[in-house]
Amino acid sequence: MYKSIQLRGIVFAAIAVVLGAFGAHALKAVLPLDRLQVFETGVRYQIIHSIALIVLSLAMMNAQKQGNADLTIKWMQRAALSMTIGIVLFSGSLYLIATSSIMPISLGAWIGPITPFGGLFFITGWACWGIASYRG
């Protein structure tokens, strides 16, 4: 259980590094500064929450070894799921918004409202982790 969360965090972190380099080199020449900053915000939140997933997986492993209540681990699983959804919705929508001017297809206005939902999932993830810590 915690290994899959840890692997997810590692993969998301690697993707964030690749996207950060892509933004700093390839996109810098084709995007205006304000769009580049939007892209960089997506990368920053992705790397932060990728590291959080890795740390959370270690906390889950520790809780499991100590025999903490299943409820604590369930809250940690909820936190991991919420952060994963947050990365996809928040960072993913920012990447699409930032690069929409160079995309071959029009994304329409629907993409913008997705970002706050991703932020809500981030907040939910941190809250779930807080509940798990309090219960543990």
Image (cartoon, grey):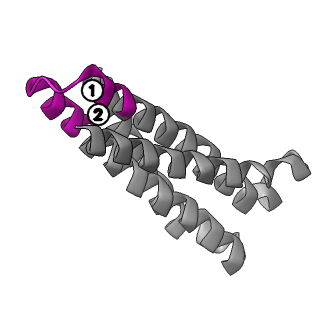
Amino acid carrying label 2: it is Gln
Q: Please, what secondary structure does the residue beneath circle 1 have?
A: helix
- Residue 50 lies in magenta, yes or no? no
Start and end of the magenta stretch?
Answer: 57-75
**10 Å neighbourhood of mark 1: few (<14), some, or many (≥20)?**
many
Q: Nearer the viewer, mark 1 or mark 2?
A: 1
> Going 27% across and 26% down the picture, which residue do you hit?
2
Secondary structure of residue under mark 2 = helix
Quadrant of the rendering where the N terminus is positioned: top left
Q: Residue 12's spot in the image, x, y percent? A: 42, 42
Q: Which mark is residue 2?
A: 1
Residue identifier under label 2: 6
Is 93 left or right of 134, judged from the image as shown? Answer: right
Q: Is residue 111 left or right of residue 133?
A: right
Tell me if residue 13 can be seen: yes
Residue 65 drawn in magenta: yes
* Image x and y of residue 56, in percent: 28, 41
Q: Nearer the viewer, residue 55 or 109?
A: 55
Q: Amino acid at mark 1?
A: Tyr
Say whether residue 17 is visible.
no
